[in-house]
Amino acid sequence: MTNALLTTVEFCLTYDCNLRCNNCTSLVSQAPCNYGTLTIETVQAFIDDCITNKDPFSAIVLHGGEPTMHPEFSTICDMFLKYLAREKDKRVDVNICTNGNDRKIVSYYCRKGFGLSSSPKIANNVDANGNLLAYFPINESAIDEGKPYPVGCEISRHCGICYNYLGFFACSPAAAMARVFEYTPVAHTISELSIGKMEESFIQVCRHCGRGRTDTIKKTEQSSSKTWLSALDDYKKRHNLP
Ligand code: SF4
Ligand code: SF4
C-alpha cells in the first residue's frame, strides 16, 4: 500500500457544504463551522511555502466541506493553475474533491483543466435512488467501548495529511476533530512537518475517531458515542449553537 503521508495534502478551503450528510468526516453537520474558511492570503502563503520547499507534495487536493462553496473558489483555482504552470516537470497533481452536487460548477472547473476526484458514491452519501449510503461513523470512539483502536489507519496512508485554517494535521478527520476536541496543529509550515510528529499525533486523535476502526459497521443514521455526545455538546455551547 502506498503511504501518502507527507506526499499528499488535503487542503481544506472551507467547512461550509451544500449537503449535511450523517457521519460526515469533516463534521459539517455535527459541528457546524462558519469560521473555517481560508483567506486568499493564507492560500497564497501555502503556495509560496510549497515553492520555497521545492514542491514537497505530489498531490494537493482542494477539499472541504465542499471546496466549491468557498466564496473565492475561482480565484483560488487560478492561483493553483499558476502554481502548476511554473512546475515544469508536472510532478504535482492538484485535484478538486467535490461532492459533485452542483454539476455546472464541476464541469466549469473540469474545463479549466482540473482533475475531478469526486466520489458521489461516498461524498453525496446517497445512491441512485436517493437512499442514504452507509458510512463508517467517525463519531464512535473505541475508548468508549474499551476496544482497541488503530494508531493511524488507511485514511492517512491513502489520503495524506490535511491543512486547514489552524495548520497541518495528520489526516483530514483529525483536522476536523480539532475544532471539537481543541487539538493544536502538528505544524504551521511545511518545514516543521515530520513523519514522527504525525505518528505522535495519531496517539492523541485516533482514540476519539471511529473512522479507522475495523469493528464498526457502516451506518446511515448519525451515530455518536458517549465521548462525542459530550464533546459536541460542549462545542455547541462554546459557539452558541442550538
Ligand atoms: S458532502 Fe462531504 S463534506 Fe459535505 S456534508 Fe457530505 S460528507 Fe460532509
Ligand atoms: S483513525 Fe481517524 S484520526 Fe486516526 S488516522 Fe484514521 S482517520 Fe485519522
Image (spheres, rainbow, N blue to C red):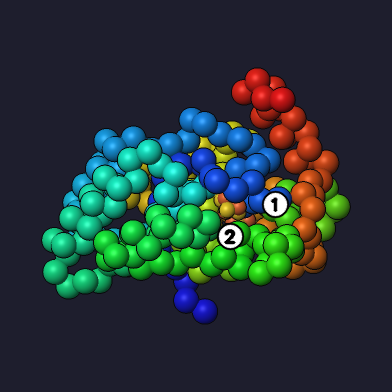
Label 1 CB, ligand 1: below 8 Å?
A: yes
Q: Is residue 94 left or right of residue 229?
A: left
Residue 41: image quadrant is top left
Is 216 on the left-hand or right-hand side of 111?
right
Q: Nearer the viewer, mark 2 or mark 1?
A: 2
The image shows residue 213 at horizontal and vertical percentages of 72, 62
Residue nearest the viewer, comparing 159 with 81: 81
Seen from the viewer's position, the closer of residues 144 and 82 is 82
For residue 23, which numbered disc appears in the image? 1
Residue furthest toward the right?
A: 145
Residue at 80% across, 65% down: 217
Q: Quadrant of the C terminus?
A: top right
Label 2, label 1: how many angstroms apart (C-alpha)? Answer: 11 Å
User: What element does badge 1 sit on?
Assistant: loop
Q: Which residue is mark 2?
A: 123
- Residue 212, x across and y down, in percent: 67, 62
Queried on whether the Cβ of the residue with tag 2 lies below 8 angstroms from ligand 1, the answer reads: yes
Q: Secondary structure at mark 2?
A: helix
Asked if 119 appears above or below 18 in the picture, the reply is below
- Badge 2 density bin: few <14, some 14–19, many ≥20, Cα 10 Å: many
Q: Residue at x 34, y 59 (%)?
A: 108
The x, y position of residue 88, in whole percent, is: 14, 69
